[in-house]
Image (cartoon, grey):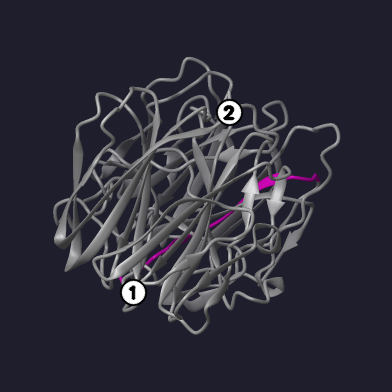
Amino acid sequence: MAIVIESKTATNGSGLGGSFNMPATRPNGDLYIAILVCDTDMWVHPGGSSVQTTAVSGWKTMYNGPDQSYINGWVGYRIGSSEPSSYSFTMDASDGWQVLVMRVSGFNTNTPVSGVFVDDARSGTATTVASPPAIAYGSGDMIIGVQLTDSTVTMTFPSSMTNEYSTSAQACHMSVGSYSGASVGNVSSATIGDWVHSTARGYIGLTFTIVADNPSLPVAGPPETTVTGTGTSHSFNMPSNRPDGLLYVVVIGIDADNIATPPSGWTEICASTDNGLQNYWVGYRVGSSEPASYSFTLDASDGAEALVFTVDGADTSNVVDASNSEGDYGSVSSVGPLSLTTTSENTLCFWGLVVDSDEVGRSDITPSGRSVVFRGHPDGPRLGMQVDVTIEESIGAVSVGAMDVWQGFTDTLSRFSFAITAPAVAGLSGISAFNTKSQASISKWDGVLLTAGKRLNSKA
């Protein structure tokens, strides 16, 4: 079944947040995507909560822009279930905003949305703006392109894009386009084309993919979050949708101690030794009558975070292509990811670290050259540490070194990396990794690829 945008509903307002309208017709099981733009400072969160578990209650966050002086945005999705007529949200500061909600049918219910790439926090020095690249995981995928600006503009869409929405209101502008029919693999900025702003203003450009059934490449979707307490005994929640046969990957970060008893039925990918500062345990399992949660224990009372990723389209008979593990790195202010050399094409690669820090801000850790991290705490560290994972989809066999850098902290950390194998697909050749240095018309873009699952924060 083809992906179809069934309806679009827009709301605008001003203040410290508000509520946005849902479509008049709201079938259960449809996909609802909300895109929010705010004129200047914001950080979308639920009712002033100090720990951001979900930015808008019941929605999975795909992008939540950093506080900055130009323009900000939030993108989220949910699968419909007895939908209300509106949803509320809160922002850090009072300002003008717009929200567009798209109702979509024909999507992959395991991983509805993935591959969010962002040209973020631009100050507005040009009117012709290259689209961020994208990924098509299968032949029926739909790529969505978004431009958010901090003032009234007239927008000319890339030739590949169908104009779905383009409106200025509340001193900000939103344009949204769709693109179907891209070849499977990396879709370059040149293929998508340029956006032309009538006036050079601060802007955010982003792309993401609505995934169709039967992806040809491994694909992961956005996260869910669980918060519990501290101690030696812990549990993490599994995603609410847990089909048999899918691959599940868990990354557990611990503040100072180590795993004593891993979750039952999970196979270890990599783990750090107990260095007394920060540790991790990474494992996988193939879904079979999955429970709602799994338990694990630590060798001493401490806090932990667990990130559970759902991966569709992986080779479940030969899951791990490569892995690398490292303990205490030392106190640093910037670091590249732990090297990873894959042996097969089109793998799903993870680079991660656990930072022993209470000082990292929401937007401080930004790896250049790959994708923005998915953070254990979207609004900053808790538990005396922070778990960060960067994910790169659909790459060929590569060796990754210091081209990516996390920065903005000075503290000790541990690093890990691993790659999930893709099944051999007839006629699909290796897909080269994106390299931002070749994106001549973008001075910097950050690809945000958020992954399906649950996160445990085991100490408030």
- Residue plotted at (34% across, 73% down): 150
- The percent coordinates of residue 324 (x first, y second) are 66, 53
Q: Is any atom of residue 291 visible in this view?
A: yes
In magenta segment, residue 358? yes
Which of the 4 image quarters holds residue 335?
Answer: bottom right
In magenta segment, residue 252? no
Q: Is residue 89 left or right of residue 259?
A: left
Q: Residues within 10 Å of mark 1 (few under 14, many from 20)?
A: many
- The percent coordinates of residue 33 (x first, y second) are 39, 42
Task: Give how far apart the Cα atoms at labels 2 and 1 are.
Answer: 35 Å
Q: Which badge, 2 or 1, is on the more N-terminal residue?
A: 2
Mark 1, residue position: 151
265 or 87: nearer the viewer: 87
Q: Say whether marks 2 and 1 touch (CB < 8 Å).
A: no
Q: Is residue 66 left or right of residue 111?
A: left
Q: Is residue 95 left or right of residue 292?
A: left
Work out which quarter of the rendered image holds the N terminus and state it.
Answer: top right
Tell me which amino acid carries mark 1.
Ser
Q: Is residue 436 left or right of residue 290?
A: right
Tell me which amino acid carries mark 2.
Ala
- The percent coordinates of residue 108 (x first, y second) are 53, 29
Give SS at disc 1: loop
Give the residues in magenta: 344-359
Q: Is residue 56 above or below residue 127?
A: above
Mark 2, residue position: 2
458 or 173: nearer the viewer: 173
Which of the 4 image quarters holds residue 263?
Answer: top left
Give SS at disc 2: loop
